[in-house]
Image (cartoon, grey):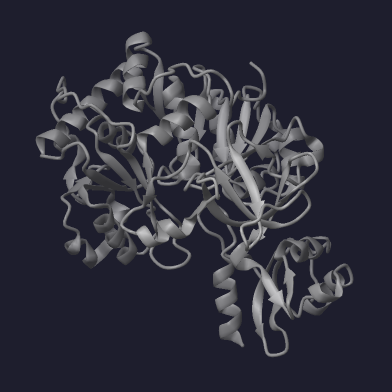
Amino acid sequence: MPMTPAPDREPVHPDFVTLPDLIRRRAAAAPGHTALVLDDRRLTYAEFDALIDRVAAALQRDGVVSGDSLAICAASSIEYVLTFMGGLRAGVAIAPLAPNSTAEVTAALVADSGAKRFFLDAPVHELLGPVIAGVAAPLVALDGSPAGTAFEAWLAPPGARPQPVEIDPEQTFNIIYSSGTTGLPKGIVHPHRLRYNQLIRHLYYPVEAVTLISTGLYSNTTLVSFLPTLAAGGTVVLMPKFDARRFLDLSQQHRVTHAMLVPVQYKRILRDVADFDRFDLSSYQMKFCTSAPFAADLKRDAITRWPGGLTEFYGMTEGGGSCVLYAHEHPDKLHTVGRPADGHDIRVINDAGEELPPGEPGEIIGSSPVIMREYLNQPGKTAETIWRHPSGKVFVRTGDIGRFDADGFLTLMDRKKDMIISGGFNIYPSDLEEALLKHPAVLEAAVVAAPSEDWGETPAAFVALRPGHSADAEEIRSFANARLGKTQRISDVRILDSLPRSHIGKVLKRELRDQYIAAR
């Protein structure tokens, strides 16, 4: 098999078909093929398909109809997957929620999604505490705990079949809630048509794929690897809690061929596991990465030390457009996120909406067949995210700053909201972070805008040091400023044990900025 997936490959199923129907076809064609693995438990496609039927039938028995929604908040499990797929087969929209949110946010999102059933596990029930009484949806415990009706007891009996449901391509497939770094997370609505375009046309996995899933099923990062594997009829190996050594053990044990990881996971696997090179990873065909900045030196490590190709995707859960970097084919472009995917129109514009030439930084916008329908219940936010070209073509605003090079490769710079305007000059934190990271003692760095009476804003830096290294803040500041222009100079450096990160590894700059202002 070639290293590079074929985003322009002719679809296996040229007409619209739902994911549960693809699973049904696989169950008929290869009933004994393994669909799901978790620890010592395995489900064949025949068993998987029958259990999906029982979930769909149970939902219909309970009066949940096509067009309704259900919410899931739990650790990854086979029961989680069955609920997700059974809901889809019944025409129900799935709202997977992050189990690491606050109790108040989780309860608010269950209500916002309009869920008719709430599937959870014991840790989430404990997290919700007294607010659980305010959740209107009946509870089903995926782990069989007293958190709700036990999943096994709730399931329709063996052999149960749901009433057939015709799915409209524009019907809601899922509601993915954004990370919510500012206010309540927004519900990103994906129709079945969008997922079909991803599954069949853009993220092709072979039928022999064995994909290791080590991030939460509530994240779109996970779904763009998990869903195509099932659509292709491959095998999904679930890892509910990430551990670098355990990941390598499972890869070797199950002869894993594909995995989607975020950059911090690559770092923990490649840099923190001292005997990484002793593991047999020769089965890998392709590794993927998305969701957070991926350092060029870490990409190089993944290419040279880990068999199989490395593909980085840049895009938003909201859709719009994606860039793809086949890192193993372009070792001289590791500082970029690649070129626009086939059929995706990615542009860079200024504040006036004018398209900028290569080399000029501006906001990245994208248009493609993969665009969300809306932010659920938030028409104003939806309108803010959509940008229309004078021709009428619809683009999604990413809020990211970037620039194309002469070869059409896109380099990410910063979030637009993170750009620092000091004395009328635009300062991109990534340039300053790059200078800080050149100091031999600095492991990671983040630069934020701090208030300044003289300049309006001024750059303030937070760094974490490498184990076994020492340096004082002023030494690091002077080192970086010697490599920066006069208008870029860092005003202050704070040393932390580590930088705060989200569940997918993004540095929480707002938290750092608030921390800095409070300390002053």
Look at the image and tell me whether residue 294 can be seen.
yes
Q: Position of residue 392 (x, y in %)?
A: 50, 46
| Placement of 471 over or under 360, stated as above or below | below
Please give left or right for residue 348 compared with residue 42 in the image.
Answer: right
Rendered-image quadrant of the N terminus: top right
Label total for image: 0
Please give left or right for residue 245 compared with residue 89 in the image.
Answer: right
At x 79% / y 36%, what residue is drawn? 331
- Which of the 4 image quarters holds residue 155? top left
Q: Nearer the viewer, residue 156 or 378?
A: 378
Q: Nearer the viewer, residue 423 or 433?
A: 423
- Which of the 4 image quarters holds residue 477? bottom right
Please give left or right for residue 360 compared with residue 519 in the image.
Answer: right
At x 42% / y 45%, what residue is drawn? 372
Q: Seen from this angle, which residue lies furthest right?
A: 482
Look at the image and tell me whether residue 477 can be seen.
no
Q: Position of residue 487 (x, y in %)?
A: 81, 75
Q: Seen from this angle, which residue lies furthest bottom?
A: 453
Please give left or right for residue 7 compared with residue 468 in the image.
Answer: left
Q: Position of residue 141 (x, y in %)?
A: 23, 45
Q: Seen from this angle, which residue lies furthest top?
A: 29
| Placement of 317 over or under 13, stated as above or below | below
Q: Seen from this angle, which residue lies furthest front?
A: 391
At x 30% / y 66%, what residue is drawn? 104
| Placement of 480 over or under 18, stated as above or below | below
Rendered-image quadrant of the C terminus: bottom right
Q: Position of residue 349 (x, y in %)?
A: 65, 55
Q: Nearer the viewer, residue 223 or 408?
A: 408
